[in-house]
Amino acid sequence: MNIPVVVVETGKAAGVSATKIAAMFVAGRVIATGLCLTTPSVYLGLGLMGITYKEAFKRAFAWTLIISMILVYFAALVVP
């Protein structure tokens, strides 16, 4: 079994719908894309700013964590 299937099955056992779990996955992933090493736009932006990935990650990690937690929370509230 892959991870999403395990999470959906665990959520069903706890009474959480698969739609709500999917929305929370998407909301959490949207913000993390900006720190992904395989996203070309990240390297373009870092090159234009003149900083290294390590510096950017140090500055952005706490904000990314906070914002993604907020987005996941709102996804859990909004999706039926």
Image (cartoon, rainbow, N blue to C red):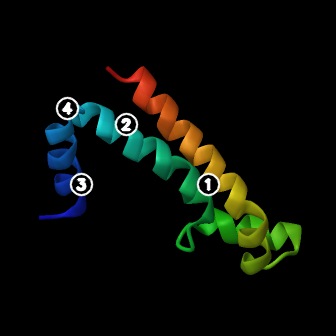
Residue tagged by mark 3? 4
Residue 3 lies, with reference to residue 15, above or below; the image says below
Disc number for residue 65 = 1
Say which amino acid is labelled 4: Gly
Q: Secondary structure at mark 1?
A: helix
Of labels 1 and 2, the one closer to you: 1
Badge 1: residue crowd in 10 Å (few <14, some 14–19, many ≥20): few
Residue tagged by mark 4? 15
In which quadrant is the N terminus drawn? bottom left
Of labels 3 and 4, the one closer to you: 4
Residue 77 lies, with reference to residue 47, above or below; the image says above
- Residue at image position (61%, 64%) is 35
Disc number for residue 26 = none
- Residue at image position (67%, 66%) is 42
Badge 4: residue crowd in 10 Å (few <14, some 14–19, many ≥20): few
Badge 3: residue crowd in 10 Å (few <14, some 14–19, many ≥20): few
Q: Earlier in the sequence, mark 2 or mark 3?
A: 3
In which quadrant of the rendered view does residue 67 lie? top right
Q: Is residue 32 left or right of residue 48?
A: left
Say which amino acid is labelled 3: Pro
- Residue at image position (22%, 42%) is 11
Q: Is residue 27 left or right of residue 13?
A: right
Residue tagged by mark 2? 23
Mark-to-mark CA distance, 1 and 3 = 20 Å
- Residue farthest to the right, as pictured: 50
Q: Secondary structure at mark 3?
A: helix
Mark-to-mark CA distance, 1 and 2 = 17 Å
- Residue at image position (18%, 64%) is 2
For this rendering, which residue is in front, 24 or 15?
15
Of labels 2 and 4, the one closer to you: 4
